[in-house]
Every structure is written in C-alpha cells, then in structure tokens.
Image: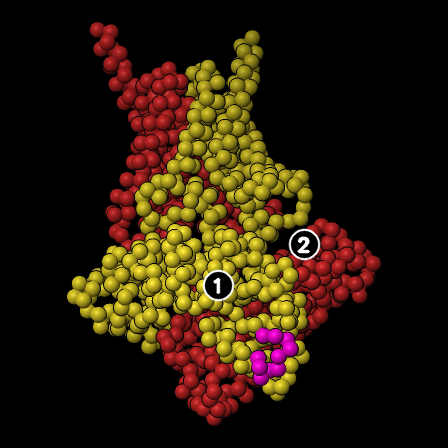
Chain colours: A red, B yellow
Amino acid sequence: MATFELRLEQHSGVMKFELTKDFIARIRELIDDVADREIREIMEGLHPADIAETLDSLRDEEALFVYRLLDKEKAADVFIELSEEAREALAQSLTTKELAEEVIDRLDSDDAADFMNELPENVKEAIIASIEDEEVASDIIDLLTYQEGTAGALMAKELIRVNQNWTVGTCLREMRRQAEDIENIYTIYVVDDPGVLVGTLSLKKLLFSSSSTRSIIRDLYDRKALISVLPDTPAEEVAKMMEKYDLVVLPVVNDAGILLGRITIDDVVDVIRKEAEKDYQMASGLSEDVEESDSSWLIIRARLPWLLIGLLGGILVASVINLYEVELSIYPEMAFFIPLIAAMGGNVGVQSSAIIVQGLANKSISLSSTSQKLMKELGIALVNGVVLALLVLAYNLVFADSPALSYTVSLALLCVIVVASLFGTITPLVLNRFNIDPALATGPFITTANDIIGLFIYFLVGRMMYQHFEVAEHLTFL
Amino acid sequence: MATFELRLEQHSGVMKFELTKDFIARIRELIDDVADREIREIMEGLHPADIAETLDSLRDEEALFVYRLLDKEKAADVFIELSEEAREALAQSLTTKELAEEVIDRLDSDDAADFMNELPENVKEAIIASIEDEEVASDIIDLLTYQEGTAGALMAKELIRVNQNWTVGTCLREMRRQAEDIENIYTIYVVDDPGVLVGTLSLKKLLFSSSSTRSIIRDLYDRKALISVLPDTPAEEVAKMMEKYDLVVLPVVNDAGILLGRITIDDVVDVIRKEAEKDYQMASGLSEDVEESDSSWLIIRARLPWLLIGLLGGILVASVINLYEVELSIYPEMAFFIPLIAAMGGNVGVQSSAIIVQGLANKSISLSSTSQKLMKELGIALVNGVVLALLVLAYNLVFADSPALSYTVSLALLCVIVVASLFGTITPLVLNRFNIDPALATGPFITTANDIIGLFIYFLVGRMMYQHFEVAEHLTFL
C-alpha cells in the first residue's frame, strides 16, 4: 500500500514521503513475516534519507533486519543519515570488517570521518586497520586530525584537481579517473606544480570551449580572486562566508596555499541551522542540544542547569525583598506588583540582548560605537517605558486605592525598563569582546540579574514614595 | 591602503574582506576627492557582496556615486545584495530605463522578481514596459504571480532543458545557447515533447560518456525518482526537503509535471536562517524581524506588543495576589518568594515549549501520541521539580524562620513546575493542530499564563499550609 501511494505521487511529478504510524506498522508486519522481497521493493523506491527516518522509528533489531536487506551502495548513504542513537546501535551490531568495507569505504571522506569521530578510540583504530584502500585510510586519518567545528572537520578530500600545465586532453583523462568517487563536481580546481590552488575552471567552460584537446589549462582557467579558507577557520565563519558569497563549494587551503579539500554547502546548512538553534536554545534555557525524542535523562540534564541558576536567582531576590520586610508589612499591597516589575525587567532585557546577539551572529551589527548604541537604546527604552508606565498609571489610578502605590509602580517600571534595556544591550557586547558567546546574555544570568535590579529599584522607589505621601498627608492634617 | 591589504591576504590563498571604520573613512575621502580611478580600482578587487556591504554603510548620495562607477555587470550583482533600505534609496535615484536595462535585465529572473516585489505597482509596470528582451519580461511577469513564501517565488526560470529525443550533438548545441545566462549549471533537465520533466542528465555524464554525438539523450539520462515541488509548496517545506535530501538544486513542476523552473540552495539558505531566527525572535519577545541597525521607530514597534501583553499579564497577576491580601498582611514574608515562583514557572514552561517547537520545526518530533509525550514530560518535571524543591527547602529550613513558609515554597514550586511543564508541552501541540505557529507558545502568552497559574498555586498552598501550622501550634498549646 505504501509503495502504491509513493508511485502515485511520483506520477504527478512530485515525490513526497511522509513517515506515518501506518507505514511503520506495515514495515513491522513485513519484518515479522520475514517478507524480504516486499521490504526490499519498498526500500528501493525510497531515498536514503527517508529509509534512515524509517529505521530511526524502528526498534534496533528491526532496523538491523531492514538495513541488511538494503542494496550495499544505498546502505552506506542510509547509515550516515541515521540519528546518532540509531547509528550507534547499528554500528554495534555490525562487524569491524562490515563497517570498514561496506560503510567507510563507500562514504565521502567527510562523512566517514564524522562517523569515525563518534566511535571509541579502539574501535576507530580497528576500523582504520581494516580499510583496504590505502588512500581512503590516509584521507580519513588526515581528516580525523582536524578539530570539530573547524573548516578542516567539514571538508571532504574528494575533488577534481588539475595541473595548470596539462592539456585539455590530459585534463579530461585525469578528471574521468578522479570523478569516479565524486557525485557532484561543481568546480574543477586548478593547481600549480607544488599543488598551490591558482584558480578554477568551470565544467561549463570545459564543455563548451571550442579549444582543441591540445590547449593548455593555463590559458583557460579563471583567475578571479578565489575565496578560500584555512583548515582552522571556525565552522560558523565558513557558513557566513558561503552564505554571504552565495557559494556552493569552498576550497580549503593550508598556509602555503596548497589545496587540501573542499567544503560543500549541504554540510554548511547543518552548521547554519545548528548555530541558529543554539541561540534559540540558550534563549529558552536549554543548556544542551536536545530533541523531544531524546531520552528523559538527557532532557533533564539539559534543563536542570538553567533552573538551578533561576532558583539561586529567586533566593537572591527573596533576600532583596527581605530587606524591605518593614515596608511590606505596612504596605502589603506593594507585593501585588512584584511579578509585573520582575517580568517587565526580564522581558525588556531579553529583547535588548536578542537584537544585539542576532546582529553579532549575522555580522549585521552597525559600525556605530558602543556609546551610540546605548544612546539609541536609551531612546527606545524611554519611549516604551513612558508608554507602559502611563498605561499602568491610568489603570492604577482608576482601580487601585493607593496613589502612593500607583506612582511607585509607574516610576519604578520606567526606571526598570531603562536600566534593563541598557544592561541587556551592553552585556552581549561585553561578552563578545571577551570572546564569550554573547547568546549567554539572553539566558539565565541576565533575567536573574534584571529581577534583582528591578525589584531593588521598585522597593527603593516605593520607600521614597510612601515617605513623600506620608509627609504630604501629615501636612494636610496640620 | 585597503587594496594593498586585500592583495596581501589573497597572496596567502585566503581572501578575506572585513568592513572597518577605516575602510569606510578612506572611501569617503576618495569620494570627496572625486577620485574615480582609485575607487574603481578598489571596487574591482572586491566581491559584489563586499561592495554591497560597503555601500550599505555609506550615505545615500555617496553610495550612488560609488555605484555609478561600478562595472555594469557587477553593478547588478551589487544592487541585489544591498540592504533593502539602501536598495530602495538607490532605486529612487536611478531612472526606470537604468533599472530595466542595467539591473533587471542582468539579474537572474528570481532576483529580478524579488526586487520588483519591493516596488510600488506603478514603478513595477513602468519597469516591465521598459524591458526590451521580451523573454526576460515574460519570465518576470510570470514569477511575479507567485505568492511570497512559496516555491514559485523562490524559483528562477534560468535552467538547462533538453528534449529526450535530441541527439547528444543537438543537446550540446542547445545547451551552449541556453547556458549563456546561467552561472552554475548543476543539472541538465530532460523533458519529453510536451515539456514534462522526465529525468536529469549530469554534466559529468555528458562530459565523460564515451557515446558519440549521435546518441540519443533518452538512452543516457537518469530516470531515478526525481524530487520536485509544486509552485505553491511553502518555502519552509522546500527548505526542509533540500536540507533532508542534500539537494543543491530542486526543480519546480506544475500539476501536469511540466518543468517550470528551479530553486537553488543559496536562496533556500536564507529561508532556513530566517525561519530559525523567527523562532528566536518569538522566544525573545520581538514581534517583527528587526536588526540593531534598523530605525528606532521600527525597533519600538517590534518590541512594544509583547511588552503590552506582559503588562496586561502583570496587572492580572496583581489582581490574583490581591485576592490574598489578608494572608499577605499576616504573613508578609510570603511576598519574598513571589519572584522565584513566577520565574521558575515561566522558565520551565518556555523550556518545555521550546523543545516541542523545535521538534515541530525540524520535523524531528517523535511519532508517540500526545498522552505519551505528556507522560514523559511529567516524569522529567517530577525529577527536576523534586530536586529543586528539596534544594530550596534545605535553604529555607536553615535560613528562614518560618517552617510554614519553607514547606509552602517547596510544595508550590513542585506543583508549579509540573503544571508549567505540561502546559508548556501541550500548548505548542494544540497551536500546531490548529495551524497556528507553535512558536507563539514560547512567547508572551505562556509566560504570562504561567505567572498567573504559578502564583495562584503558591498562595493556595500557602493558605492551607499556614492554616495547618496554626492548627498544629494551637494543638501544642492545649
């Protein structure tokens, strides 16, 4: 039934796979019936990424059963698309030889190295020892030396490299040999004798150039300023460059300019998403990259740190309010607006920080000085603060009995908004200056700090205001 | 000086442009000196994206001056990379004819249509009337019919289309003609006589196939299940598909399967980033996509809505606490922990929502039922809740005088964490069911709702606890 639906959709020119409970149930049934042929048939019509999604939803032994039925070439692609948990389980059921020959050897070098990095040291060594193709083994060993989160760890070794002194004929012959392992060519890299990247030659140019096969590459290739990165360039910077310059592929060279590998856009899309998600998680109080489908234990671990900081902050705030116990017992209505003051301080602070954090992340932040930024923020805070303070004042003067409380809340709110805005603006800038992730500013520290500062201001204003009104009342009595 | 630095960097194989205040000051000097030659020389060495970044930082009339000095072909690329504000200002200084001939005609159809969409209707029509190339005009008119945020609005008309009945020779000749306007070919699309997309032919295969120029394309092309989208497929879905299937280019077909255009990954990277940023902005309380460099007015408008909701929430919370004024005047120390209870409820709720929101956005959410998700969340909440409640209990028993208050805070905290967790989990799922953006759940409504529920629980527990302790004290007196 599932295959039928798929075929139907393909017919109209649009292939669309949606993982449903029914589909999983059907696959499970087929596994129970050991219906190898049917499973093979269904899997043949699916993209490796869809098969991986299906295996992720099966139990480990079921996934292994289906995996062993896959076409060998496709199996490697499925393997690398699996969730880390499912891949780990599957890897444990496969022999070192199977992993070396049927997975590693068939993967692109970057994917192979990524997977190897998930393995314990001894397994890693055993697999490398089992790889028969020496070039593959040395490529992987080389890639494993680069640190995670750098251009080196993102790059693949597979690329088309031609010497500028070759003729078009030699170039085509050599390219045919090199292209065997490469799915998408994108660009032909032109190097000089020592291997320094000197330019690129587009496949289009090679295909359409009317030059004979005896022309020399030197006379054909594009010398335009080449954009490249070093192996230790941070992954985020690589992502920003590829995004900014609309690149599909980016060469990696060493300090001497020698071509080492290439980074393709599909690997960078992950970096871009992960980067954006990291900021989101930070702003939502998650300390690790967790998903809803992760184990409860992992989720608890990701959530507890911020909650602990929040708890500590709450206790600190309690001690601040404690300082004003006398005022509170005389004017218990002051307690009513504690949450409002705390919440508004936190909200304003997070807003201010988020704008700066995103500006820093996108490199879209203006060249204005910090003091100019603060002046602008002050203006914005004053407008928002006055609007909100007047609104709550109007409400309180109508519905609350105490004018002292009414003026206190509004004046404190205005102060809190201004202070939280400036604090929220400056914190990510300072963190960034010290090379600390500015996104921390939208996390627990700022909201807690704003709670404390905000309530301190509130009670300070409150004390003054009540004294003022008491004196005023006293005077009217005279 | 700037050119010198750039050259120096290029020499080591790595081109890197960084927009500095010094660079802008130098360009301004050159503009004041009307030093056309120097400006041209500097701009020649820069990538269009870097030139655009530079123009964004100049005043409108300065940007216009530099823009007019640019090489015509490059100018169009710079134009489309400008910030929307700078582009609008520049467009107003250019004549309709200039826009039509020097910008629109030189841009890819998708970029041209994107720009046209920024213009008022009458200007749009005037420009279309000024386009001399009829094919360009009709492509743009066609692209303008697709709604923003759909595959149709993302696609470009430029692609290589060959008929399956052509010989390789005809194919090469036709491709050479079609490829003139196309920077990156990526894939050759094979269609049948009515224009229905039937498969693809890789440039690699065409280049390396040993077939003679008389072979028929039908015998060469790849019939593997083609992944394609319809013009009304939402942009986010396009992004998810390209990311999942690691695609660099994706064909767009109509209901009949006729090939309409192609979407390239660089346009989709923007969609992916914007999508991720939207969630972040929602979680940070910004109602619009604002940047630090935007006008103060725009930023105020983006920030005020959430603050107004927060204010309203704060007033509601104040009325809830008001219900317990009697308790508060007897036990004013209950006010100390109001911020802690409110903050923890908000934090836990946002955490729970964020995990679900991200799962929905990535389609990585598990297939488990809602009740299974809630049971899992309950377990997580109980663990975190018990840990936090015990910690604050230990603190309060040591440092606070009132055992009633100590037990109240801990019991209320546990209840609040459980309720906020479940509430935070269910809300985005419900919003999603009703096709409302689930990211709303991490925004103002949830935090405010959690404040209200949390403090309601706190005072309810407090009232019971104090009654219990009073009865107990009373009993010991007897």
Q: Are marks 1 and 2 on the same chain?
A: no
* Relative height, residue A24 to residue A204 (above, below): above
Q: Secondary structure at mark 2?
A: loop
The outermost residue toward the left is: B33
Residue B42 is situated, as x and y percent measured from the top left of the image, at: 27, 70
Q: Which image quadrant for residue A420? A: top left
Q: Residue A318, can we see it?
A: no
Q: Residue furthest front?
A: B129
Please give left or right for residue B63 compared with residue B441 in the image. Answer: left
- Is residue B170 within the magenta segment? yes
* For residue A445, above or below residue A52: above
Residue reaching furthest to the top: A478
Give me the residue at 24% from left, 7% from top: A477
Front residue of B177 and A247: B177
Residue A126 percent across, percent down from the top left: 62, 72
Q: Residue at x 67, y 39 (%)?
A: B371
- Vertical arrangement, residue B39 with respect to residue A50, above or below: below
Q: Nearer the viewer, residue A459 or B469?
A: A459
- Determine the secondary structure under disc 1: helix
Residue B298 picture quarter = top left
Q: Bounds of the magenta span?
A: B162-171
Q: Which mark is residue A19?
A: 2
Chain letter for mark 2: A
Kind of residue indicated by mark 1: Ser
- Give the quarter of the image for residue B43: bottom left
Q: Name the chain letter of the residue that bears numbered label 1.
A: B
Q: Quadrant of the N terminus of chain A?
A: bottom right
- In the depicted structure, whether residue B136 falls above or below residue A320: below
Q: Is residue A11 magenta?
A: no
The answer to whether residue A168 is visible is yes
Q: Give the residue at x 26% y 56%.
A: B60
Disc 1/disc 2 C-alpha distance (Å): 40 Å
